Image: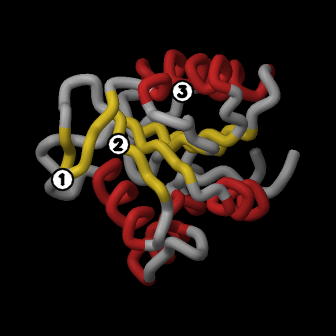
Amino acid sequence: MESVKTAAAEFLSHKRVAVTGVSRNAGSHGSNVVYQRLKERGYDVYAVNPNAETIEGDRCYPDLHAIPGGVEAVVIGTRPERALATVQECDELGVKDVWMHRSFGGGSVSDEATAYGREHGMTVIDGGCPLMFEPTSDPGHKVIKWVCRANHHLPAHV
């Protein structure tokens, strides 16, 4: 098993990233925050929501298959019961780095999706948030990272 720090560094080294569960009603929705921060940090980021054509003025895709040129990594920000289908789609597309978002509460983590991904050679980060790690972090997410470690919502190893 590798440390979450190493897995996060590898995940964030990819520049083409999809974020699932991005909402039309942005507010403080976790997927939207991740989407915007990655965009601000220079990533080629793609919003995925089958119920929207645009998100925050950007084109939105119904699924990962629809993204032209594909992606290298995927942040899952949907309900956990949707995570397995997304991980299976990642497997079909050859995406090897997947992050299931979770800060407080259940988040997007699915034990079944985690097991499937790892059995199929993927690195699956099952908790926490990409914004807790450099180069995308901020002081607030560093505090949340500490809290998530304490309540086991951020794994030490993946």
Question: At which x and y percent is residue 34?
Answer: 39, 57
Mark drawn on residue 47: 2
Q: Which residue is mark 3?
A: 110
Q: Indicate the amino acid at tag 2.
A: Ala
User: Would residue 155 appear left or right of 102 to someone viewing this image?
Assistant: right
Residue at image position (45%, 68%) is 144
Q: CA distance from mark 1 to mark 3?
A: 28 Å
Q: Nearer the viewer, residue 54 or 134?
A: 54
Precedes in sequence: disc 2 or disc 1 = 2
SS of the residue under disc 1: loop
Neighbours of disc 3 within 10 Å: few (<14), some (14-19), many (20+) = some
Q: Is residue 126 visible?
A: no
Q: Nearer the viewer, residue 7 or 61?
A: 61
| Residue farthest along the front direction in this orientation | 68
Q: Are marks 2 and 1 in contact (CB under 8 Å)?
A: yes
Colour basis: secondary structure
Residue at image position (71%, 64%) is 9
- Looking at the rendered image, the disc whose residue lies closer to the viewer, 2 or 3, is 2
| Location of residue 78 (image quadrant) | top left
Question: At which x and y percent is residue 77?
Answer: 40, 40
Residue at image position (54%, 70%) is 146
SS of the residue under disc 2: strand
Q: CA distance from mark 2 to mark 3?
A: 21 Å
Q: Indicate the amino acid at tag 1.
A: Glu
Q: In this picture, is 12 found above or below 90?
A: below
Q: In this picture, is 53 found above or below 102?
A: above
Neighbours of disc 1 within 10 Å: few (<14), some (14-19), many (20+) = some
Mark drawn on residue 56: 1
Precedes in sequence: disc 1 or disc 3 = 1
Quadrant in which the C terminus appears: top right
Q: Are marks 1 and 3 in contact (CB under 8 Å)?
A: no
- Looking at the rendered image, the disc whose residue lies closer to the viewer, 1 or 3, is 1
